[in-house]
Structures are given as structure tokens and as C-alpha cells.
């Protein structure tokens, strides 16, 4: 439809509304402009011009009210919000918001922190002048509702506060940088909320404080605007994909609400809780045209209050109804997004007694107006989408802005109309969180004072503090009763020979100083959700989990967390902890200091920090006086006591001076020179590794596969090449080849006048397309042959296997198996390997479908059997245990077949060995460090379906290759700031790079 022909239709729509269309209940205010307020005619004409069809607009946004004093977004943008070709930088958005603040007492702008690259984040409050004047008193009222303990859980007092308080509705835009529409929509929304005198908008302004963070991922926004400008300057060329968003991660910046590792997550949560907001509404773009996906689909997160589920349904349903009544197609709220994982930014609200909401609107990844063709499932009419999007449509950024603003205005209006209910629910959800111990439980989580991994325990507690969870510390030792697990009665009669199982303990003692996370606090919900276990049934009707199915932080950090249901724990004497006390340091006097190894990542930090100290690793456990030290214990010389004391206090490590050196074998622990490699395909998964390394202050040279390939002698510069995962999609060949460059133009990732923000503190290239290349691959191989260590994980391990960087390892996948971001059990196979230092026999790990490793002792060998495998004796003479015979000849001795476990390489038979150059010498065979647990022990949390396919297979392999090693991970050991338990498998590899063969049983066999 042409642009001109629909002006008439708009009028028709108005008439419909004026004659009582829509979904208004008695006394509700219609969505219509104030006829007495003049319209900004020029601006309005452009809105209409840039909207591609009348039904992509609404009576709320198809005009702009005029103001004599308040500037419209046009003063900064040079055009209207959503105009083609216009994408403002964050700074321009802020400039406009601050102009608004200057022009009207209805707008207030606050700084809420900075990003990793030092850019500012802001929040803009819009409300009536009276409300903004009264902010502090209102905040105090809301704070009491947020923490019902302050009013002694008195419902009458709460009702009074509910009737006196103005609620806060917090909107966040553009966390996902290629989803570009929100900043301009939010600029215009701020203007409307400040200026529009229609009853519909005035009521919102008078009744609600709208809080807006127009750009959440500020670093990524500025890069995205750069790219868009490059695209405008080179309209016929392909433009580079947005490879970096924030400094560390891309799309996963919306998966940080558990680990709280990114500044944007911390800043948004602090703002949300600081303002005691009721709603956090996060704006995204992918699905046509507006999918309010909070209602989504099951399974819902088990820890959200049913009150919240009702609120989602209420707001979602009304939102769809309002927009449908405006005649806007493609608005729906059910869909295929499950609301299980609490990792999304919006879920900060769901986990802190608020209302989480998320919009997917339709965006073009920039401000071009484009013809868009949808997939069949996107335009199909379904029960929950009776008015679906069109199969083909001309779509503009203005359309997107119309949908976002209309959705938000109707939401705000509905929220205001029902704010007493929502405020009362806000209080009620807080009250129910406080009542958790006497309702569903538990009473508390306890982290014992004597956890050997004190520094990791501290890191987990710091995550809780960032979540605003209250932590206490007991001032005495105490005991709690443990719940008694009911034994399943066996249908079979009891076997008299079977020994009775030892009785499970009925109580547990905790030492003084243990940490207690009480559940009688307003934010018990988030602590419970993060510390409890998750179970996703393989029978769940939802067959495609949207994200991880498990996140039990005690398991992923490898620290002891006890779920205590015994409410006596709440009366243990304890003190609030607002900051973790410093611990660690040096005990005793002497020139040799020992730090026991419990696989704490801080050990690696210490090695780099004490550059001049000599550090040895104990290759065996030992005892000194009455103290026992485990394998891998650091033995430190050549550092002053005071330097060591300050370093270990900062890192939370305990050093002990030894009177005499233990008489055991040791080897030097050296700080390797690390080449840290990324592709130009994706930097997301490796970004989480980079973040972990930066937090641990471990230095590395960050380089692309292209740059690696250009280094003439890798061994001269580096000891270890770290190649973290790319993404699930990167094939071995794509890592080598990159993006095809036989056609098209170079894709530069460089700072230029058009793109001043692209590089930031990351990497650059004149052309993103080339990959590692075959020369680069050869260099990697030479590096390892000459003694270097290459460390890979998940898809980069598949790359190393597929391209022959290792011998005797196969990596496969399983069609049936579903381990979707789950926590699985693994078992130490070779505790003598330095990679295993500090670990116990059982290690919980994050796994996302493997790959499935198998090791062989013959190159190219497959475990293949012709005919059925013979596990028992064949049919013949005698009893089951007797040998068979052959008539007419003496019995022949049956050669003993070497038994092997599934994770081991089968020993070649004499026959296989004969004249076979493909038999790998024992010292060159893969060494299995860690394997997946047996099938029955595989699932720790989340979803494990057909786990048998990976059960017992190797999880971490150390494969000798020439003079060097390739260390392959099937698990992802470093992930989203949540998996500190497995960090040291990587760090141990680094610190023992030149001693990996230590403890190898077959190292000397040839
Ligand atoms: Zn998104």
C-alpha cells in the first residue's frame, strides 16, 4: 500500500475509536489525543511518511503533541525518531534526555554507572513535577513495601503505603546492539510522557514514575552505529557483522543475571532496586511484529511466585488486546520461549519480587527501510496469534518505534490503572519471600567456614552480594537436622547376603564463622533459585529448551552449599556481612612456604603476581608436622614474607611456612607466555574466558587466527596457545577458511573516521573474512610438535581432532542425546596429572552436548565388531564356567583379552601390532584426565536425555604430539562467570605447561 492512500484509513480508525471501539472497561480513558493541544505538524507528517502502512501505527503515536518549551528528538536527530538512515550514538541520546531535563521539571536524568570501556549509563525518570519533587519520600515508602520486615509484615500498614505510593516502571533498551530501534523510540516516548496533555498520557505521568535506560549495552551501541554509518557510506557493499558488542560478550550480555559479571547487569540491578521499581521491561528485536514473550511458554522457572505468573498473563493479555483493538497486526504473547532460566536481564525483576517483561519487536538491524520476507512459521495464524504478521512487508525503523511506543504506552496505562493491585502484589511477593522458611522452605543455605576452597567460596558469596542477597556469619558452631530421605521399598524380597546400606546422616555440624543465607529476607527467592538444584524432565512437553537447563551455583563453583530445612538454623547467633572479611595470608616463620592445592583459580593469579618467586609443585601428597598437603601444593621460595602475606591476603589464599622442605618429587611452576586466539566468526564464547582471565589478572596476547598465522615462530614467543570455544556453529573447516572471500568486498574491523568506536579495547583487522588458513594450521602443528601446548574446548577441540592435530582421538556427536546447558558429573581418571591438581575424585562440570570423545591406540581405528559381541562362553559342553571342547584334539588355551574401560584406549592385540605403523606408541597415546560419570551418576542438574551416549567417555584429554601437547575439553570449563569449579583444569594446564607428562604411567614405555 502506498504512503498516501492510508491517510484516510487513519481517520477511519479514529472514528472507530471515538464511537466506542477497543477494549475499554467502564470509566477507562480512551487512547486518544487531546484535541485542545496543538500538534507538531511537521513532525507528525514525517511520522506518517516513514510509517509504511497505517495499521503499523496507533492513535497513541501517529501524531506528536507540540510544545513551545520542550525540544522534540528532532533537535538532536535532525529528523524524527525512527527516521530512515538515523541511528544516534548513546551520547546523542543522552544529550537529548538532558535537554529534556533542562526544559521540563517532569524529567530527571541520573548517571547509573559506567561500562567496561568507561562509557556512561543513564536512567531517565519521567513523571509529574509533583512526583519528581517527592522522589525521596516516595522512595522511602516503596522501600518499606520492598522490605516488609520494616513494617513487621503488617498488611494494614502496607495498604496505607500502597495507597500513598507512586510505582516505578523501569524500561531498558538496546541491550542487544544489532536490535537498534529502542533508543529513538525511548527518546520520543520520554517526550510524549513529558509533554502530551491527553488524559491517557497525563494519567500515566501523574500516576507512575517511568524510568528509562535508553541504551543498556552502550559500548555495543556505539560500535553498531559506527557500522551503520559505514554501511551508509558504502551502500553497495556488504558491511561487517557486529563481532564485538560489549568488551567481552555479545548476545550473552542477556544471560548474565545469575553470574552478575558484567557492569551493565550490575548497573541495571542497582538502579532497579535503588528505585524500588515494580517492573523491569527489556526491549528486544527479532520476532515480527511484537511478541510480549514473558508469557511465552513452559516450563516456567520454578522459583517465581505464582503471583508474578498471573501478572505476566494480565499485562500480556491486555497489551495484546489494546494493540489488536488499534488494528495493529502481529501482536501476541504466547510463543515458544520458555521462562525457565533466570539468566535474562529482565529476570532480575522476577527474582527480586518485581515483574519481568520482554518485548521482541521487529527490527531491520539498522535504520534502512526494507522489504522483509518472513518464514512460514512467523506468519502462520495460530490459536495465540489470530492476527499474524504478513508474509511479506515493507518495514521501517519508524514502524518498529510505533510498535515499541504503543506497547509501552498501553502497558504503562494499564499498569497505572491497576497500580494499587501491582503495588500490593509487590509487597505480597516480598512478604512471601520473607515467609519462605515457614512456607515452602528452605530455612537457609549454609556455606561452612571450613570449606577448603575459601577463595572460591568468597567469589560465590560475592555473587550473592551483587544480587543484594543478605549474608550472615555465625558467631558460634551449630548443628542442624538434615531431612530424612525416604528409601524406596524394593518389590523384590530382601537379599539376606546384601549388606545394609550405612544410614544417611541425620544432622550436620558447622563451625563458627560459617556463612548463613537466611531465607527470611526479601530477596530469598534469588538465593534459593541460584543455590538449589534444577531438574528438567526428558518428558517435558517443551522439547527445545531456550537456554541452559541448570545453574546450581554450589556445584558450578565447587563449593559446599547445604540446603537447610531445619528452622532452628535461624536462631543461631550470627552477624550480617555486608562485605567479605579479608582472609588468607602467611602463617608461621621460614623461608619455604606451602599453599595447599584445592584447585583455586587464585593460585594462578599468585603465580603471575609473584614474578620473581620460585614456585614448585609437589608431585605427591605429603605431610609436614600434623598438616597434610595435597598433590600440586605450591612450594614457594625467593619471596619476602611480607610480599607473600599481602599477595595471599588479596587473593584469599593461606600460605604456611614449613620448617623443612618435604622430600618428594617436585617440578617448577612457571608463568607461561600465552597466545589467546579468537576467530572473526564469533567472539562470544571466548569472551567469557577473557573476562575470567582479566578478573584473575592473568596476562595474555589476544590475537585472531589471522594474526596467529602471520607469526613466523610461535614457539619463540609463546608457551601455550589458548583457543577457547568459538560457538556451536563453527566447523573445523570454517575456522580454517573463515568467510568466503572469492566474492564481495573486504569487511574491515578498524577504527576509521566513520567508525571511531569499532575497535575499543579489542582486536582489529582490515578484513574479517580470512580464517586461520592452511599455513596457520601448519604453524599450529609445528608449534605443538616443537613442544608447545595447545588448549581447546568443545568446538575448537573438534577442530583439533578433525584436522589431525592429535592422534588417536575421535570426536562425535549424538542425535539422540540432549544435555542442554546442564551440570554433569565427571570423574578423575588420572589424579597424578598436573591438570588434575587440587581436584577430588568427583568434579561437577557444565556440559552442552559434548562433543563425545573416544580414544584409540591405533590411528584410524574404530571399535567395530563383525557379528554379535561375545560376552559369555558359547553354547557347548559343561557348566557355565567350564571350557568348551573340540572333539578329536587337545584343548587350546584361550588368549586373555585385555579388559578396558570405555574411556580408555583398547590395547592393540598382537595381531593388530604386527607390521602396523599405525599403532600409536604408549607414550604418545591420549591421557585421560577426566571422564564423564557413569550413566546413572551423570545428571547433577538440568536435562540429561540419552546420557548413555557420553557417559564414561573422556571429558578432558591430554594428547602428546611430538614434543608438545594438545589438551582437549569436551566440557566447557569457563562459562558465563558461573563455572569457577572447572577453571583450574585450564589454569593447571597453563602453569604446568612444561611438565604435563608428570605422573604419566606409560611415559617411558615404548
Ligand atoms: Zn535481543
Image (spheres, rainbow, N blue to C red):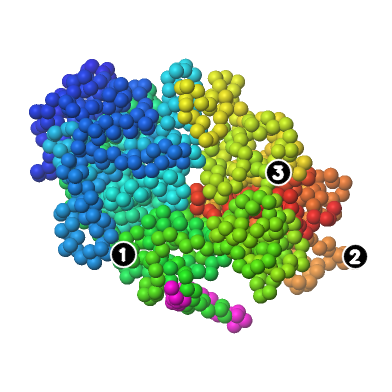
The residue sitting at 25% across, 20% down in the picture is 46
Q: Which residues are magenta?
A: 475-499
Mark 3 = which residue? 719
Where residue 29 sits in the image (x, y, percent)?
Answer: 12, 39
Write the residue at 46% across / 36% down.
245
Q: Is residue 265 visible?
A: yes
Q: Which mark is residue 889?
A: 2
Q: Earlier in the sequence, mark 3 or mark 1?
A: 1
The label shown at residue 272 is: none
Which residue is more in the foreground, 422 or 644? 644
Crowding at label 1, few (<14), some or many (≥20) Cα neighbours within 10 Å? many
In the depicted structure, whether residue 172 falls above or below residue 561: above
Quadrant of residue 229 within the rendered picture: top left
Point out the residue furthest to the bottom here.
496
- The answer to whether the beta carbon of the residue marked 3 is less than 8 Å from any atom of ligand 1 is no
- The residue under label 1 is 434
Q: CA distance from mark 2 to mark 3?
A: 63 Å
Distance from Cα at disc 3 to Cα at disc 1: 53 Å
Membership of 584 in magenta stretch: no
Q: Position of residue 929 (x, y in %)?
A: 68, 56
Q: Earlier in the sequence, mark 2 or mark 3?
A: 3
- Asked whether mark 1 and ligand 1 are closer than 8 Å, the reply comes as no
Dot 1 falls on a residue whose secondary structure is: helix
Q: Position of residue 451 (x, y in %)?
A: 54, 67
Write the residue at 23% across / 64% down.
151
Neighbours of disc 3 within 10 Å: few (<14), some (14-19), many (20+): many
Describe residue 586's horizontal placement relative to residue 1001 as left or right: left
Asked if residue 489 is among those painted magenta in the image, a careful observer would answer yes
Closer to the camera: disc 3 or disc 1? 3
Badge 2 local density, few (<14 within 10 Å), some, or many (20+)? few
Dot 3: element: loop
First of labels 1, 2 by sequence position = 1
Amino acid at each position: 500500500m502506498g504512503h498516501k492512500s492510508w491517510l484516510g484509513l487513519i481517520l477511519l480508525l479514529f472514528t472507530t475509536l471515538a464511537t466506542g471501539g477497543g477494549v475499554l472497561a467502564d470509566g477507562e480513558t480512551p487512547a486518544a489525543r487531546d484535541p485542545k493541544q496543538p500538534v507538531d505538524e511537521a513532525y507528525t507528517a514525517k511520522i506518517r511518511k516513514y510509517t509504511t502502512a497505517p495499521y503499523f501505527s496507533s492513535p497513541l503515536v501517529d501524531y506528536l503533541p507540540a510544545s513551545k518549551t520542550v525540544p522534540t528528538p528532532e533537535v538532536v536527530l535532525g529528523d524524527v525518531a525512527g527516521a530512515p538512515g538515523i541511528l544516534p550514538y548513546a551520547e546523542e541520546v543522552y544529550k537529548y534526555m538532558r535537554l529534556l531535563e533542562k526544559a521540563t521539571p517532569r524529567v530527571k536524568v541520573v548517571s547509573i554507572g559506567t561500562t567496561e570501556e568507561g562509557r556512561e549509563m543513564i536512567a531517565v525518570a519521567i513523571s509529574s513535577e509533583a512526583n519528581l519533587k517527592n522522589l525521596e519520600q516516595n522512595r522511602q515508602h516503596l522501600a518499606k513495601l520492598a522490605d516488609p520486615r520494616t513494617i513487621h509484615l503488617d498488611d494494614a500498614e502496607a495498604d496505607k503505603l500502597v495507597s500513598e505510593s507512586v510505582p516505578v516502571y523501569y524500561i531498558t533498551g538496546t541491550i542487544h546492539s544489532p536490535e537498534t530501534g529502542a533508543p529513538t523510540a525511548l527518546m520520543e516516548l520520554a517526550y510524549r510522557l513529558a509533554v502530551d496533555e491527553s488524559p491517557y498520557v497525563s494519567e500515566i505521568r501523574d500516576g507512575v514514575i517511568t524510568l528509562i535506560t535508553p541504551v543498556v549495552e552502550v559500548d555495543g551501541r556505539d560500535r553498531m552505529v559506527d557500522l551503520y554509518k559505514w554501511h551508509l557510506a558504502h551502500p553497495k557493499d556488504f558491511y561487517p557483522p557486529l563481532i564485538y558488542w560489549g568488551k567481552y560478550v555479545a548476545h550473552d550480555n542477556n544471560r548474565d543475571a545469575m553470574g552478575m559479571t558484567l557492569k551493565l547487569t550490575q548497573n541495571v540491578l542497582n538502579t532497579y532496586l535503588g528505585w524500588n521499581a515494580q517492573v523491569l521491561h527489556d526491549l528486544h528485536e527479532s520476532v515480527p511484529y511484537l511478541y510480549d514473550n514473558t508469557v511465552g511458554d513452559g516450563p516456567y522457572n520454578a522459583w517465581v511466585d505464582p503471583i508474578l505468573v498471573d501478572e505476566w498473563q494480565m499485562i500480556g493479555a491486555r497489551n495484546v488486546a489494546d494493540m489488536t483493538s488499534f488494528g495493529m497486526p502481529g501482536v501476541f504473547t504466547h510463543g515458544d520461549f520458555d521462562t525457565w532460566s533466570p539468566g535474562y536481564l529482565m529476570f532480575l525483576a522476577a527474582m527480586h519480587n518485581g515483574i519481568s517483561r520482554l518485548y521482541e519487536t521487529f527490527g531491520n538491524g539498522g535504520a534502512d527501510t526494507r522489504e522483509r520476507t518472513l518464514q512460514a512459521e512467523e506468519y502462520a495464524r495460530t490459536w495465540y496469534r489470530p492476527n499474524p504478521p504478513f508474509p511479506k512487508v515493507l518495514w521501517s525503523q519508524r514502524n518498529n518505534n510505533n510498535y515499541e511506543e504503543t506497547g509501552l504506552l498501553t502497558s504503562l496505562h494499564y499498569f497505572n490503572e491497576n497500580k494499587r493491585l501491582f503495588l500490593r502484589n509487590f509487597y505480597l511477593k516480598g512478604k512471601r519471600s520473607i515467609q519462605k522458611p515457614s512456607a515452602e522452605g528452605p530455612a537457609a543455605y549454609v556455606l561452612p567456614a571450613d570449606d577448603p576452597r575459601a577463595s572460591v567460596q568468597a567469589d560465590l558469596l560475592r555473587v550473592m552480594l551483587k544480587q543484594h542477597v543478605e549474608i550472615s556469619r555465625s558467631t558460634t558452631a551449630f548443628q542442624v537436622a538434615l531431612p530424612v530421605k525416604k528409601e524406596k521399598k524394593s518389590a523384590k524380597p530382601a537379599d539376606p547376603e546384601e549388606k545394609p546400606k550405612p544410614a544417611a546422616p541425620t544432622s550436620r555440624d558447622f563451625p563458627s564463622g560459617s556463612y548463613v543465607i537466611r531465607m527470611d529476607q526479601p530477596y530469598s527467592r534469588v538465593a534459593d533459585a541460584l543455590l538449589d538444584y534444577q531438574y528438567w524432565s526428558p518428558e517435558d512437553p517443551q522439547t527445545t529448551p531456550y537456554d541452559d537447563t541448570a545453574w546450581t551455583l554450589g556445584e558450578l563453583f565447587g563449593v559446599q552449599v547445604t540446603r537447610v530445612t531445619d528452622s532452628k538454623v535461624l536462631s543461631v547467633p550470627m552477624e550480617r556481612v555486608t562485605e567479605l572479611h579479608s582472609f588468607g595470608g602467611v602463617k608461621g616463620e621460614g623461608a619455604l612456604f606451602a599453599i595447599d592445592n584445592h584447585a583455586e583459580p587464585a593460585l594462578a593469579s599468585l603465580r603471575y603476581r609473584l614474578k620473581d618467586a620460585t614456585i614448585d609443585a609437589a608431585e605427591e601428597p605429603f605431610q609436614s608436622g600434623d598438616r597434610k598437603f595435597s598433590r600440586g601444593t605450591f612450594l614457594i621460595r625467593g619471596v619476602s614474607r611480607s610480599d607473600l602475606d599481602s599477595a595471599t591476603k588479596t587473593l584469599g589464599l593461606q600460605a604456611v611456612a614449613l620448617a623443612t622442605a618435604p622430600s618428594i618429587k617436585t617440578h617448577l611452576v612457571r608463568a607461561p607466555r600465552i597466545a589467546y586466539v579468537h576467530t572473526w566468526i564469533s567472539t562470544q564464547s571466548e569472551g567469557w574466558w577473557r573476562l575470567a582471565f582479566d578478573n584473575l589478572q592473568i596476562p595474555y596476547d589476544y590475537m585472531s587466527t589471522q594474526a596467529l598465522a602471520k607469526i613466523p615462530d610461535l614457539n619463540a614467543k609463546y608457551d601455550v596457545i589458548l583457543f577457547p570455544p568459538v560457538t556451536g556453529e563453527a566447523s573445523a573447516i570454517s575456522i580454517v577458511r573463515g568467510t568466503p572471500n572469492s566474492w564481495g568486498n573486504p569487511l574491515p574491523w578498524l577504527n576509521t573516521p566513520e567508525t571511531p568506536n569499532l575497535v575499543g579495547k579489542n582486536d582489529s583487522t582490515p578484513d574479517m573474512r580470512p580464517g586461520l588458513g592452511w599455513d596457520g594450521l601448519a604453524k599450529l602443528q609445528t608449534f605443538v610438535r616443537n613442544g608447545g601446548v595447545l588448549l581447546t574446548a568443545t568446538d575448537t577441540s573438534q577442530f583439533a581432532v578433525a584436522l589431525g592435530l592429535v592422534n588417536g582421538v575421535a570426536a562425535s556427536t549424538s542425535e539422540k542425546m540432549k544435555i542442554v546447558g546442564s551440570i554433569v558429573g565427571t570423574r578423575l581418571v588420572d589424579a597424578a596429572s598436573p591438570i588434575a591438581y587440587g581436584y577430588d575424585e568427583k568434579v561437577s562440570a557444565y556440559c552442552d552436548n559434548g562433543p563425545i570423545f573416544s580414544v584409540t591406540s591405533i590411528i584410524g581405528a574404530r571399535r567395530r565388531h563383525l557379528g554379535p559381541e561375545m560376552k559369555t562362553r558359547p553354547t557347548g559342553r559343561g557348566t557355565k564356567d567350564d571350557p568348551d571342547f573340540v572333539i578329536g584334539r587337545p584343548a587350546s588355551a584361550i588368549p586373555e583379552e585385555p579388559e578396558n574401560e570405555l574411556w580408555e584406549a583398547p590395547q592393540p592385540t598382537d595381531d593388530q601390532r604386527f607390521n602396523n605403523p599405525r599403532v600409536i606408541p604408549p607414550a604418545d597415546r591420549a591421557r585421560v584426565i577426566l571422564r564423564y560419570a557413569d550413566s546413572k551418576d551423570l545428571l547433577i542438574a538440568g536435562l540429561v536425555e540419552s546420557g548413555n551416549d557420553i557417559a564414561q567417555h573422556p571429558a578432558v584429554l591430554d594428547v602428546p604430539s611430538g614434543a608438545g601437547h594438545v589438551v582437549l575439553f569436551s566440557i566447557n570449563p569457563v562459562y558465563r562467570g558461573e563455572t569457577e569449579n572447572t577453571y583450574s583444569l585450564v589454569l593447571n594446564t597453563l602453569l604446568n605447561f612444561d611438565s604435563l607428562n608428570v605422573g604419566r604411567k606409560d611415559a617411558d614405555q615404548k
